[in-house]
Amino acid sequence: MQKNLDFYKMRQYNNYISIANYRNAKIIMNGEITMKMRKRVLSILCASIFAASMAVPSISAADIPVTPGVSVTLQSQKTCMMPQNMTDFVRAEYQKYPNSKYWAGGNVNHWTSSPSSTYNYYTPDFLCSSGMRYDSSGNQLGVFGYYAISTYSMRRSAGFASKLQADYFQTDSFIQCNLSRSSNRIKFDDNTTYTPRIGDVIKFYDNGGFSIFITNVNGSTISYVDCDADGNCKINWSNTANMSDLNVHGHRYVDYVQRPMMVGDVNGDTFIDAKDQTELFYIQLNEPTVVYNRKYRDAAADITRDGIISILDGPTLQQVIAGTNTRQYGYLYE
């Protein structure tokens, strides 16, 4: 059993060397891995293997204690991406916030039968305004909060969409990633195309601003719920739009997409992919990219959920990316 564990960790070393080649700006010289880097990687692996061989449940030299303060929802990522789960949610929320009523009156969980001058305000527990950002050359500028906003009250369409999002994902902590529009293409800061997900909140900045909560994605067509298209916070559950020429009540210019923070999204860009493996590698070498909120970064990087960031998180993250890990992972919240 121990030999299998040692072999697995040495194989992980080879995987990390591949990742190192992928991020060669800092650790590759003349096409070869530097001796300093090789020694650092080997020291991490040897420390982990030694700790495992001694069967001591203490933190090894390679392990990083997770900064406390962030928990994980019972609502899983896989469940939330199931259309039927959203259908059931919409059915329940429709009863809570009836169509053609008004999200107003001073209580976020209630509505009024007629327009009211008393707005409802929704305030998230934590909001990373912009999430992952890139400069004009495509270099990462920050992780988990270029601007970290802990108290930011939203009202009207933005408040209603965010309240629905919080109810659906069971978290009040979100990342906002910048979007821009080039002709009919909507893209992120790194120039990749935005593909909508159920549960997304899209914010528009033109014509006074407007926000929507996406309830279904069918090809290029999205279904969404909003309030305030009439200027009086009237709720409307029956809306559709085409992503090829997105136009929501006359709003066309997108500002950002808002998404919950996920276990496994180590670099804070709202995706779980090979870039997160790279970031995890650098965290374990104590050379992460710029971080503005470490407790959320740590919670996202602790894939094994054992309270430490260790060499074991890498293989587990690989399984998550490959879809071979059967464990249910949730969303982060304070």
Image (tube, rainbow, N blue to C red):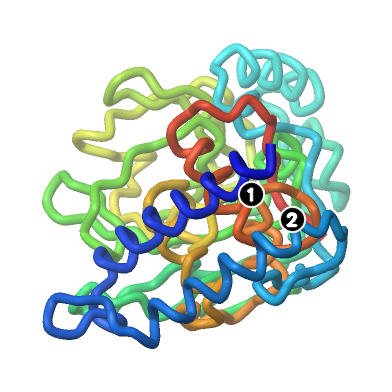
Amino acid tagged 2 = Ala
Query: Is 329 situated above or below 157?
Result: above
Q: Say what secondary structure mark 2 lies in.
A: helix
Label disc, if present, on residue 205 of the rendered structure:
none
In the image, what residue occupies the spot 51% across and 41% down?
Answer: 200
Question: At which x and y percent is residue 178?
Answer: 39, 63
Label drawn at residue 52:
2
Observer-nearest of 136 and 179: 136
Provide the residue designation for mark 1: 263
For residue 121, say whether it is visible: no
Q: Are marks 2 and 1 in contact (CB under 8 Å)?
A: no
Quadrant holding the C terminus: bottom right
In-front residue for pair 19/70? 19
Q: Secondary structure at mark 1?
A: loop
Q: Amino acid at mark 1?
A: Val
**Residue 172: x %, y % from top left:** 75, 53
Label 2: few (<14), some (14–19) or many (≥20) C-alpha neighbours in 10 Å: some
Which residue is more in the foreground, 317 or 177? 317
At horizontal 64% and vertical 57% (from top left) the residue drawn is 300
Residue 187 % position (x, y): 26, 53
Residue 100: x and y in percent read 65, 26
Q: Count how many numbered circles sit on residues in the image.
A: 2
